[in-house]
């Protein structure tokens, strides 16, 4: 796959960067992993199968057959509320862009997976905690509208801390907007599959993430409406570790399946085979 | 001691109100004419009222929206010509923090829905402080579909801090319940009029607020998160809620400016509870007028306009930042 400019440069930085980037420590079992091995294992710990949070570009590369054609990449945000706290919101966006190499919390586009043409939306927690602002909603809407025209399935990888505070109600309204787009897309007979990744909460989980035909979650991903901290503060007790994990949701009947990332692509291809033309 | 800044402010006023009433009584009982004293006191009272409530900050509006005496959804619904409450989600239980059912409004048949907080501690416990569980949203979804099947317009009253953030709500898939409710409102081929009457908190409020016409009381608030929640999320410090309130742009006039709210319903000086009867009547008139306007549209047209309305909210505006990373 020919990498977009920004993608190549982000990786180049890592390659010539400091030694710390060579090694990654598993936050769960403490194993020190050689970063190249970790990447080759799709950012799953080779010892304990802990799933690291994945960058959107690595995700795309791990899922698509070849080309990925982006849509909505030129849709970017300013500072609609004139928000400023420690620094102005547009400055926060700028530094997140530089740090993450991403232009927003979601990247959308078209590709093939196992020979099936699909529309893809990949959210990335590394940009503003994957929060949904106007651009997030606009890009997903553009994608779904185009996928509907093409009558092809859509796969959304969700990862989000919820609606983006700094865009206020305009962010909340993206729940309504994406719901509209999802509903039109699905009502026209198209297949929507959502992959919930760590973490998916708030306004994203309470809109398109839980409106899909099939909902798959990555192993141990944290998924919920309210964040763990909020619930603990409300009930004034500590929650069990298993609470709000993918496995917990599967047990409660909220999702269809839990998948190990290393089996994800083949699972998606199998599922697509049932519904593709 | 109340932690509501509006209630605190009203305490002195209550004393003044009592004195005016006493003076009136005394004046009626005695041959002595005390009307000039009464009039002077009343002028004073109005002056203080204007001083205290003439200009409310966003934070003060947050407290006004939460005022214990502020009319709640049922205060509006009880002024409909008729209301037959329908209960339950057909799966698990009836959630009293959302009320709904068939109703007659100015002899028009509608389905009405609203989040309902308690008017005292006991009722608040029963109604979970107006924070709906998934069962509440499933009831709302069911009633929205019922309305659409029989061509009945949907009238909603929004008043919640937000959806319930508890263990049982997570176990019963709060996210799915809200997401599905949003879809039901998006696809209902009947006119929908939503009124933000108190606090409009986050996704839990939006679930009853996707509408063709969104009305909002002057001192209500409608926000992506509660100011306390926002401060906790951004700054890990809930005590900065006042600052968050002013940044969030959660007032009726802010939201009218963004095109999120279509019409603002004015409140008397000092808030809706100072003339609840009047505010309720004015609100129902406004709802009725909106329904009359919307009655002219076909179901198809309503869906199209509703889609467009939310489609263009927060549409891409180039606000100074250059697109980055586009393919060269």
Image: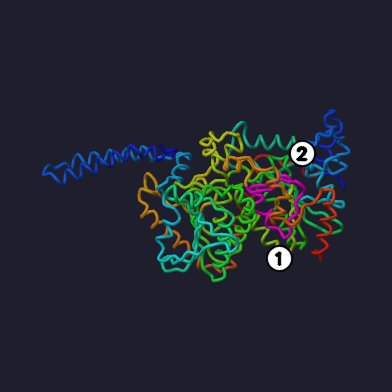
Residue furthest out toward the top:
A18
Determine which residue is flagged by label 1. A188
Q: Is residue B51 visible?
A: yes
Q: Helix or strand or loop: what does disc 2 sit on?
A: loop
Q: Is residue A73 visible?
A: no
* Parent chain of label 2: A
**Label 1 packing within 10 angstroms: few (<14), some (14-19), many (20+):** few
Residue A173 image position (x, y, % from top left) = 60, 51
Residue A198 image position (x, y, % from top left) = 73, 45
The quadrant where residue B302 appears: bottom right
Give the CA separation, mark 2 to mark 1. Answer: 35 Å
The quadrant where residue A98 appears: top right
**Label 2 packing within 10 angstroms: few (<14), some (14-19), many (20+):** many
* Parent chain of label 1: A
- The residues colored magenta run A198-225
The quadrant where residue A125 appears: top right
Quick check: B57 left or right of A2? left
Determine which residue is flagged by label 2. A101
Residue furthest out toward the bottom:
B150
């Amino acid at each position: 796959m020919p990498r977009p400019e920004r993608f190549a440069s982000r990786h180049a930085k890592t390659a010539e960067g400091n030694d710390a980037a060579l090694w990654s420590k598993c936050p769960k079992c403490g194993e020190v992993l050689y970063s190249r091995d970790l990447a080759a294992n799709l950012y799953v710990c080779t010892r304990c199968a802990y799933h690291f949070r994945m960058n959107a570009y690595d995700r795309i590369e791990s899922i698509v057959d070849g080309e990925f054609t982006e849509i909505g990449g030129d849709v970017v945000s300013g500072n609609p509320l004139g928000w400023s706290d420690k620094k102005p919101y547009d400055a926060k966006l700028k530094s997140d862009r530089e740090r993450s190499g991403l232009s927003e919390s979601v990247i959308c586009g078209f590709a093939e997976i196992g020979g099936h043409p699909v529309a893809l939306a990949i959210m990335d927690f590394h940009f503003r905690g994957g929060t949904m602002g106007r651009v997030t909603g606009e890009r997903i809407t553009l994608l779904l509208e185009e996928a509907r025209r093409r009558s092809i399935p859509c796969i959304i990888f969700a990862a989000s801390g919820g609606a983006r505070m700094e865009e206020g109600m305009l962010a909340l309204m993206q729940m309504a907007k994406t719901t509209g787009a999802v509903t039109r897309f699905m009502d026209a007979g198209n297949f929507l599959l959502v992959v919930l990744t760590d973490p998916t909460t708030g306004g994203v989980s309470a809109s398109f993430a839980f409106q899909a035909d099939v909902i798959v979650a990555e192993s141990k991903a944290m998924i919920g409406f309210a964040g763990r901290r909020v619930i603990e503060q409300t009930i004034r007790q500590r929650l069990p570790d298993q609470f709000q994990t993918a496995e917990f949701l599967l047990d409660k009947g909220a999702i269809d399946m839990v998948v190990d990332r290393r089996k994800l692509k083949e699972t998606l291809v199998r599922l697509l085979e049932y519904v593709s033309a | 001691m109340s932690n509501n800044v509006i209630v605190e402010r009203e305490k002195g006023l209550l004393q003044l109100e009592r004195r005016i009433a006493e003076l009136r009584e005394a004046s009626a009982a005695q041959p002595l004419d005390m009307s000039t004293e009464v009039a002077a006191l009343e002028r004073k009272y109005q002056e203080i009222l204007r001083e205290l409530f003439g200009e409310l900050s966003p934070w003060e509006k947050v407290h006004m929206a939460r005022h214990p005496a502020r009319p709640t959804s049922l205060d509006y619904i009880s002024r409909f010509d008729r209301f037959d409450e329908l209960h339950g989600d057909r799966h698990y239980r009836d959630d009293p923090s959302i009320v709904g059912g068939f109703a007659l409004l100015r002899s028009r048949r509608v389905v009405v829905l609203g989040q309902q907080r308690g008017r005292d501690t006991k009722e608040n416990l029963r109604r979970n402080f107006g924070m709906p569980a998934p069962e509440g949203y499933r009831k709302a979804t069911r009633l929205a579909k019922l309305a659409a099947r029989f061509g009945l317009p949907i009238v909603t009253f929004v008043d919640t801090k937000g959806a319930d953030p508890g263990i049982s709500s997570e176990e019963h898939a709060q996210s799915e319940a809200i997401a599905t409710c949003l879809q039901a409102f998006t696809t209902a081929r009947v006119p929908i009029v939503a009124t933000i009457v108190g606090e409009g908190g986050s996704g839990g409020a939006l679930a009853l607020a996707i509408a063709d016409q969104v009305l909002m009381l002057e001192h209500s608030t409608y926000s992506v998160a509660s100011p306390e929640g926002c401060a906790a999320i951004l700054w890990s410090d809930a005590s900065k809620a006042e600052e968050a309130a002013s940044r969030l742009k959660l007032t009726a006039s802010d939201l009218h400016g963004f095109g999120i709210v279509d019409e603002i319903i004015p409140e008397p000086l000092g808030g809706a509870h100072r003339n609840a009867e009047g505010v309720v009547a004015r609100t129902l008139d406004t709802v009725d007028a909106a329904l009359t306007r919307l009655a002219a549209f076909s179901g198809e047209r309503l869906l199209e306009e509703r889609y467009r309305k939310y489609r263009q909210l927060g549409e891409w505006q180039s606000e100074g930042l250059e697109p980055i990373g586009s393919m060269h």
